[in-house]
Structures are given as C-alpha cells and as structure tokens.
Image (tube, helix red, strand yellow):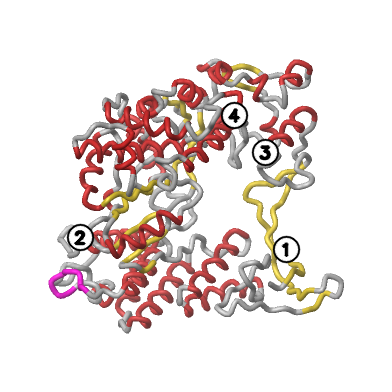
C-alpha cells in the first residue's frame, strides 16, 4: 500500500527535523527495504526493532542479542546503522544508556517504529496457521492440577471479602441475564437471540430456563409460542474459534459463545465485577472500568521505579479449570454457576472440535474478571510464600497493597518482580518478558507508555486510507487529530490532505462535535450559517451513522428484552423492529451544531 511507506517517510523526516538528525540514509533504507520486503517491513520488522530498543532501555545498555540477525547492519556500539543518528542520542559510544536521555527522543523513535504496528488487517494464512498451532499447543501445556495450598487459602480470603459486599450473598435466582454486543455461535441476530430455542442441561441444573429465559415463570407456563430444547453436554454447541485482526504479525484468537451461555455469563459478570471493585481487599487494585489507576502508576513508576509493569502472555488461555476450581473452592454454589455457563468444547477454524482444559477463551464474559482475579490472587500468594508467613486475613490485606491488576496488565513492587514472575510461571501462567519492565525508566500498562515521567505513547494508524471503507476514513481523521496534538504537525497536515482529497474540506470542531472534523489547540470551531429556528451556529459536514436491518421481535421475547434493558441502556425507539448491522458505518452529509 503506497500510503504505508509514504506516511512512514514523512513521519521519519519530521522526527529527524525535530531532533536535528539527518535522515537521508534512513529514508533510503526505509524505501528500498519496503520495495523489497513489502508492508511487513513497516508492520512487523520495525515493531520488532522497537522491541529490541525497549529491552535495551530496560537493561541500560546494548547487548549482542539486541537487533540480532542479518537484517540489521550494526555499528561499533552494537546498535544498527539504521536510525543510528537517533540511537546515538540514546546510547553512548560503548552502547550504554546516556544518563540524560530526553524522553522526547524515545517518543519520536517509538512513534516512527510503531505507527503501523496495529494495522487493522488479518494476518497471512501462514501466520494464522501458526496462531492456530499455538492455540492447540497452549491447550496441551495447561496445568490440570494446581497443587498450591497457599493459592487456595488466599483465594478463600479474597473471595469471602468480595462476596461480603452483597448482603444477600450469591443466589442464582438473583442473576439477571443479559446479551452482549458480540456475535453468537448460532449466528443469531441481535433480537433473534432473545428467542431461547435452546438451553443446556448443565445450565438447567443451576439456572432453570423457565425462570431465566422468560420474563416471569407465569409466561413460561402459559406461553405456547416459545419452545426450548434442552441440550445434553454432548449436544451443546461448541464455542467457535475465529481470528480477528490484531496485527499483521499475529491475529487475535477469540471464541464466540453460544447465546444461552453468553446470556448467563453476562449476568454473573455484571453482578460480580462491582463487588470486586468495592471489596476492601481488591477495591482500587483489581479494576475493570478505570484504566487510569494503572496508567497513573506506570507514569509515576517510570520516575520512582517503585513498581514494575508485567504483561501476561496468552493470559486468558493459561487460566485453567483447575485454577478456577481452587479459586472458588470455598464457595461451591458460585463455582457451580460459573462452571455451568462455561463452554467445554471448541470448534477450530479447520473444523476440528477439541475439549477445553482452559477455563475460557476471550469472548466469554467471565474471561476478563476471572483471569484478573486469578493473577491478583497468584501475586499475593507469591509475596506471602516469599516471606514464609501464613496466609491469613492480615497477611493477605498487607501483601495485596502495591498490587494492581487490569486484565493481563499487572503492576507489582519492583524488588519482588523476579520472584513473582517465577511463582506465576510455576503455577501455570506465562509472562511476556519482552513486554515486562522493571529495571530502567520505561513502563507500559493499559495503553500508556511512559519514560522518566513523560507519556510516550505513540499514535497508531490502523487503516490504510480507503474512501470506500468508512471505518478507515474515520480512523484516519482520528489519527491525524492525535498527530496534531502530539506536535507532529507536518505528518498531521499530510494526513489531512489525503482525507480532503477524497471528501473535500472538513470543518474544525471540538470534541463535542458530531461532525467528522479537525481539532486544534484553540478548541475553536467553524460555522457557515445561523439557524434562526434553533438559535445556533451550524456547519455542514459528514456524520457517521449505522445502517439498520429488519429484526422483528414480538410476544413474550419482546417483553423479556424490554424488562432486561430497564436501567441498563436507553434503546432506540424501534429496537424491537430493527437493529444495527455490524460493520455498517456510513457517512451522511448534513447540517449539525458547530461546537
């Protein structure tokens, strides 16, 4: 794609201009290697280059393994000649980190190297095959029996604290099921999934469908329009494993759940997550809705070095059934409920069906909260084991301090990091050591990259500009606005020109504007007319809207949906007749408030 190399060329030129670095040879290397290797040079090779840079920043000096292989010709300090002018501002003649490195240098280097890392494109068939092999291999490596008494005892204390936040305790009849926004294994429409044609026998033992799949039990006994088939475990629909875009290096592997499992999983998740966030032990430490806790601490620790950031590899796929059974052993009723809505088999993209040893893949509503709890409990257990103290309420509360978890993004005390990593891997988890940092001044957590107290998170351009794909246009406008606010004005100007070549001039607007518009530091907006009826300035421009499809829902199922949406969301007026089509954005030109 032409814009791939052109954007990178302009960005590299601007980075060099800001730092006073001559980039002629670097641009020549960029263009010639892109011509030879294709887009993978920008989307795979350059991010790998950045990973080597980050390891050297964390270590404090360059080693022979950094930038290994024949693809990068090295200079005498041990780093490549490519981008050598930039690297010379970071490392001295011996390859050691300079004591006065400007965070702006690190930011600009990473901005160029990572601008296309997260391009929204499915990986090649070869890489998909490798990802599938990795999924199967991970399944074989899962620990079936977590033999750790400390882990079980800490789990009991943590879960007791969490469940104490609900004065009534856990009761399956109080779980209010809900459908998620994603797809279902049956391929049901948004409204169609409210007609529960199937229900599993495993669910029936804990969540009777007469109570949970109907507005009331009265409707279950009186309604004859809806007939539900109970499925034995062998007849249950397996989760559907699919690939979704992540990077061109590797796709993201997720599993699409059957509607009946997804419905109960969402109900348990919406009950459990607020309790975790309110608990005296996990509250403020295990977060699901607020990433700023981890982000703020990552920024602070890039200066103080107090906490390290740990990234888990194959996070959801490494949490086994055994882990979950140990975690919830002291609360059998909740364990039964969680296991009842867990899918036990998966259908792979090649048609094979495998029995799952993991608790759940990404796609299950319970995957995120359960994995976060598992990592939190494991870290507290590791700290208790390291000190040789007994696992009681006081020790758990003490060693829960300075532990922060958001999914697979973990922050732990720096001095204890090697021991914690060892414990995590000893009980079956896997740490991504290439993305875990504790020695230097670089930290990365929850989408924030920090170096010596300054945020150096790059702007990612995820799409190649294609005017026929609305998502790509909207993404380019957003990325151009981010580039502008990051001070990359030449790059932002070029990106704006590319968009306006297809759409025509776009207005300037504020964050509150509904229009597709450019941002500026003055936060001013342009306008073309005064609306005498509505008494406001207006601008004509493009607004994104979603195409809707006919998706009628009536009878008891319609009543059930309406009751479940009370207090949860504000549906559109015609939500029982039509629903949004997935991936169906379109641009509409219209007048809108200029704000």
Q: Which residue is mark 1?
A: 588
Location of residue 568 by image quarter: top right
How far across and down, in percent of the image, does residue 84 sit? 25, 74
How far across and down, in percent of the image, does residue 330 sit? 40, 23
Asked if the residues shown at circle 2 and circle 4 are in contact, with their CB atoms under 8 angstroms apart, the answer is: no
Relative horizontal placement of residue 591, taking residue 448 as reference (left or right): right
**Residue 547 highlighted magenta (yes or no):** no
Location of residue 520 by image quarter: bottom right
Residue 190 badge: 3
Q: For mark 4, give the secondary structure.
A: loop
Residue stretch in magenta: 92-99
Measure the alpha-carbon separation of dots 2 and 4. 49 Å
Query: Which residue shows up at 30% across the image and 78% down it?
Result: 25
Label located before the other in sequence (2 or 1): 2
Q: Nearer the viewer, residue 70 or 359?
A: 359
Q: For mark 1, give the secondary structure.
A: strand
Measure the alpha-carbon separation of dots 2 and 3. 50 Å
Q: Residues within 10 Å of mark 1 (few under 14, many from 20)?
A: few
Q: Which residue is mark 4?
A: 175
Label located before the other in sequence (2 or 4): 2
Label located before the other in sequence (3 or 1): 3
Height in image: 6 above or below 201? below
Closer to the eye: label 4 or 3? 4
Height in image: 199 above or below 358? above
Q: For mark 3, give the secondary structure.
A: loop
């Amino acid at each position: 794609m032409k814009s791939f190399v052109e954007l990178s060329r302009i960005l590299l030129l601007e980075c060099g201009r800001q730092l006073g670095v001559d980039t002629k040879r670097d641009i020549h290397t960029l263009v010639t290697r892109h011509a030879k290797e294709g887009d993978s040079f920008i989307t795979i090779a350059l991010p790998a280059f950045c990973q080597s840079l980050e390891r050297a920043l964390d270590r404090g000096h360059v080693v022979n393994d950094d930038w290994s292989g024949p693809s990068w010709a090295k200079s005498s300090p041990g780093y490549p000649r490519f981008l050598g002018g930039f690297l010379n501002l970071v490392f001295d003649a011996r390859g050691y980190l300079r004591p006065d490195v400007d965070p702006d240098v690190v930011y600009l280097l990473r901005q160029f190297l990572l601008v296309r890392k997260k391009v929204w494109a499915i990986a090649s068939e070869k890489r998909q095959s490798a990802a599938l092999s990795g999924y199967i291999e991970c399944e074989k490596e899962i620990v079936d029996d977590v033999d750790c008494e400390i882990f079980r005892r800490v789990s009991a204390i943590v879960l007791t604290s969490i469940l104490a936040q609900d004065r009534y305790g856990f009761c399956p009849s109080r779980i209010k099921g809900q459908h998620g926004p994603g797809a279902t294994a049956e391929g049901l429409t948004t409204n169609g999934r409210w007609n529960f044609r199937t229900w599993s026998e495993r669910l029936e033992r804990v969540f009777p469908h007469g109570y949970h799949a109907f507005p009331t039990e009265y409707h279950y006994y009186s309604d004859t329009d809806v007939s539900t088939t109970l499925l034995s475990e062998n007849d249950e629909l397996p989760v559907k494993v699919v690939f979704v875009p992540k990077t061109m290096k590797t796709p993201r592997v997720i599993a699409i759940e059957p509607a009946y499992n997804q419905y109960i999983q969402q109900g348990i998740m919406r009950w459990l997550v607020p309790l975790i966030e309110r608990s005296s032990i996990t509250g403020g430490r295990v977060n699901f809705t607020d990433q700023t806790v981890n982000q703020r601490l990552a920024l602070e620790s890039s200066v103080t070095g107090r906490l390290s950031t740990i990234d888990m590899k194959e996070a959801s796929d490494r949490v086994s059934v055994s882990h979950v059974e140990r975690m919830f052993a002291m609360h059998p009723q909740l364990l039964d409920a969680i296991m009842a809505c867990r899918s036990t088999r998966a259908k792979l993209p090649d048609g094979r069906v495998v029995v799952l040893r993991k608790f759940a893949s990404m796609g299950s509503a319970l995957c995120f909260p359960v994995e976060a709890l598992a990592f939190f409990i494991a870290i507290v257990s590791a700290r208790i084991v390291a000190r040789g103290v007994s696992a009681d309420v006081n020790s758990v509360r003490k060693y829960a301090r300075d532990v922060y978890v958001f999914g697979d993004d973990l922050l732990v005390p720096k001095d204890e990091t090697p021991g914690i990593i060892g414990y995590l891997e000893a009980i079956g988890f896997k740490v991504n050591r290439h993305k875990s940092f504790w020695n230097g001044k670089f930290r990365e957590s929850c989408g924030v990259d920090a170096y010596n107290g300054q945020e150096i998170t790059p702007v990612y351009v995820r799409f190649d500009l294609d005017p026929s794909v609305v998502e790509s246009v909207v993404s380019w406008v957003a990325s151009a606005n981010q580039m502008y606010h990051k001070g990359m004005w030449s790059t932002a100007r070029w990106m704006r020109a590319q968009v306006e070549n297809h759409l025509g001039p776009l207005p300037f607007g504020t964050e509150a504007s509904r229009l597709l518009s450019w941002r500026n530091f003055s936060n001013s907006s342009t306008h073309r007319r005064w609306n005498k009826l509505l008494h406001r300035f207006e601008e004509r421009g493009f607004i994104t809207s979603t195409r809707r499809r006919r998706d009628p829902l009536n009878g008891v199922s319609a009543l059930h949906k309406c009751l479940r949406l009370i207090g949860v969301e504000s549906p559109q007026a015609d939500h029982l007749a039509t629903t949004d089509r997935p991936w169906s954005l379109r641009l509409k030109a219209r007048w809108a408030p200029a704000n």
